[in-house]
Amino acid sequence: MLNNLEQFLSKTKLFSGLPSEQYHSLGKIARKLVYPKGQVIFTQGEPGKGFFIVIKGKVKISQTSLEGKEQILNFFTEGEHFAEVPAFDGGCYPVSAATLEDTELLFFSREDFLHLIQKHPSLAINILVVFAKHLRKLVGLVENVSLREVPQRLAVYLLDLSERQGHKTTVELDLTKGQLAAMMGTIPETLSRGLTKLSQEGLIAVQGVQITLLDVEKLRQKAGFF
């Protein structure tokens, strides 16, 4: 029978579908870490010591330019994982990670996990699938920021948010406007103008942090989803 930690691991995207004995092995090398809100987990360029799974809380992944401009790349919440690549190639973390709220993480050291993969090669298949999904998401992010105007980027985000919140037509922003602007490669003022434009076109209605998608089909067209 799986204990609480092993049951949690079995429900994560990274480790779902493994034989029960592998959850026992994973549980033995997992280390629980607790961070307060606003705590840096690691910084861009720091040696990669391992990867993480979020037990609870929220983590921001970002890069900072030489001029000090932050580009938010992703957010991770319960059951999601991050920083796997440095854990395998032995390189530095290419991004920074920080908590947006009180957060609990599981940490898997590079050395322990690579040793475990040698014993259980099937674990590597799960990791390869994860890498492929992350690559697709990164390509989508680059396309969204470089090839779309802000209203189009907002349309993509709102449609994704609707899907993540159960295909609701009224969604609640899961980021502050400053965080959302940084994720979209723009500034809050430009983001606000983008929301206004979508409102004027009759695609959305904004009330505080709640946004109603008034015409999903036209919003998809705006996003470039045909």
Image (tube, helix red, strand yellow):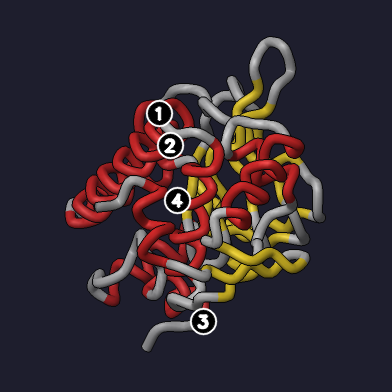
- The residue at 39%/37% (across/down) is 138
The three-letter amino acid code for the residue at tag 3 is Asn
Q: How crowded is mark 1: few (under 14 residues within 10 Å), some or many (20 or more)?
A: few
The residue where tag 1 is placed is: 147
The residue where tag 4 is placed is: 156
Q: Residues within 10 Å of mark 4 (few under 14, many from 20)?
A: many
Q: Distance between the residues labelled 2 and 4?
A: 8 Å
Res 211 quadrant in image: bottom right
Q: Is residue 211 left or right of residue 168?
A: right
Label 3, secondary structure: give it: helix
The residue where tag 2 is placed is: 144
For the residues carrying marks 4 and 3, which lies nearer the camera in this image?
4
Q: How crowded is mark 2: few (under 14 residues within 10 Å), some or many (20 or more)?
A: many
Residue 67 vs residue 198, the one in the foreground: 198
Q: Assess whether mark 2 and mark 1 are in contact (beta carbons under 8 angstroms).
A: yes
- The residue at 74%/68% (across/down) is 207
Q: How far apart are marks 2 and 3 (CA)?
A: 39 Å
Q: In this view, does 182 lie to the left or right of 90?
A: right
Q: Is residue 196 left or right of residue 120?
A: right
Q: Earlier in the sequence, mark 1 or mark 3?
A: 3
